[in-house]
Amino acid sequence: MNMHEPPQPQYSAEERRKRVFAIISASSGNLVEWFDFYVYSFASIYFASQFFPSGNATAEFLKSAAVFAVGFLMRPIGGWMFGRIADRVGRKKSMLVSVLMMCGGSLAIAVLPTYASIGVAAPILLLIIRMFQGLSVGGEYGTTATYMSEVALRGQRGFFSSFQYVTLIGGQLLAVLTVVILEQFLTSAELKAWGWRVPFVVGAVAALVSLMLRRTLHETIKAEDRNSKEAGTLANLFKHHRAAFITVLGYTAGGSLIFYTFTTYMQKYLVNTAGMPAKTASIVMTGCLFLYMCMQPVFGMLADRIGRRHSMMLFGALGALATYPILAILHGNTSPVLAFVLITVALAIVSLYTSISGLVKAEMFPPEVRALGVGLSYAISNAIFGGSAEFVGLSFKNLGHESWFYVYVTVMMAVAFLVSLRLPKTPSYLHTDH
């Protein structure tokens, strides 16, 4: 039994069924949201030249990554807006609105004219749409993490909450898998001409399905909490929970950076730095992401046994020690097998964080500001450090000092370890069921 939580209560079979179904319904929408958001990164190797023509692959990837990063800069606004909605109106309504917005964004990209058709208006419109999607996904994380932590079975919260990242990674996996399938049936010329639009259409349709599933969710925040005058307010958050907010900012910075380094950026790293063929890199990343997705419940159960604080400390320490050598070995390596093994090892370390990150954040805030506290702190760090991972990595490469990026990630992992020492040994909140 985990010594960091009270003994698990006895749930009726009906109660267990309802809670598990709620987890599935909430996380299914989460999967679609992240598919829609990340398919941009995986498909950009084909459409970058359509919106940012320059004749230089690194420059085109760099501009595409910049637009990806700008989407992240909208996340803090989304974290605040949807966090306030979730704390004052309800978690369910917040999740319904966010997935609907993401659906509209994907459909818009699917039909967006290229630079050859409308000139500079093409990249400008792409930027605006990505800002819109960034706003949506900025609210998705905090509300979903809050909801799933509140409906998870006590004593098994690490296990059940890990499914947020199972579906988040599943969204990435389905995004890269969609690209891999298209690569098997279309030529590179066809993919660059029109094939890259297909994943965005798929994402828009899937979002409508998830919208129907989320309509079945029950509300978890109590009426007295959401009706409180201080519910969902920044004044309440910063006056009474400033230390918790800063702590979450600290470990999310390192967590987001290393997560995006070994997921979305890694595909471009294998192609642009290691010299691996694009199709081979896509296949390698598909396998790595599948294993990474499967790891989440395992590491969630581990956290239930050893405690969230210990998992977070291990994450920071191992990440600081392993990041530089893994990236250095991958540099110039064209062996798909070695790349697969090294990236999988890196993602196992990241799993110590991702499997329980939403839960750890939720445990640090009370119900009336939980979605706001989780969503805003995550979004700020994610925008600054996670969303810029590709841009920073490609910038250092462009300057001829790619190893500086390895140092940067390593330093941020050391920071994550130090901040994890501040985590309470016993969760402050979520001691009672909702």
Image (cartoon, rainbow, N blue to C red):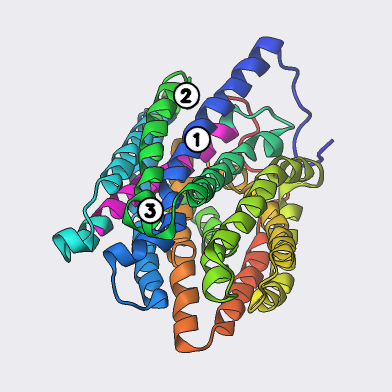
Camera-side residue: 110 or 381? 110
The answer to whether any part of residue 421 appears in the image is no
Position of residue 199 relative to residue 263, above or below, is above
Quadrant assignment for the N terminus = top right
> Is residue 363 or residue 254 the one in the foreground?
254
Residue in the picture at 73% in, 50% down: 425
**Is there CB contact under 8 Å for labels 2 and 3?**
no
Mark closest to the chain's N terminus, 2 or 1? 2
Asked if residue 304 lies left or right of residue 54, the reply is right
Residue 212 counted in the magenta span: no
Which residue carries the number 1 mark?
367
CA gap between label 2 and label 3 equals 26 Å
Give the SS element for disc 2.
loop
**Circle 3 crowding by C-alpha within 10 Å: few under 14, some 14–19, many from 20:** many
> Which mark's residue is nearer the viewer, 2 or 3?
3
Q: Which residues are magenta?
A: 127-149
Q: Say whether marks 2 and 1 touch (CB < 8 Å).
A: yes
Disc 3 residue type?
Answer: Arg
Residue 135 on the magenta span:
yes
**Residue 303 x, y percent position in the rendering:** 75, 45
Decide if residue 320 is in sight here: yes
Q: Position of residue 263 (x, y in %)?
A: 57, 58
Q: Residue at x 17, y 66 (%)?
A: 120
Quadrant, the C terminus: top right
Tell me: residue 386, above or below residue 8: below
Dot 3 lies on which element? Answer: helix
- Badges 3 and 1: C-beta atoms under 8 Å apart? no
Q: CA distance from mark 2 to mark 1?
A: 8 Å
Label 2 or label 3, whichever comes before in sequence order? 3
Q: Which residue is mark 2?
A: 222
**For the residue carrying disc 1, how many other residues have a C-alpha within 10 Å: few (<14), some (14-19), or many (20+)?**
many
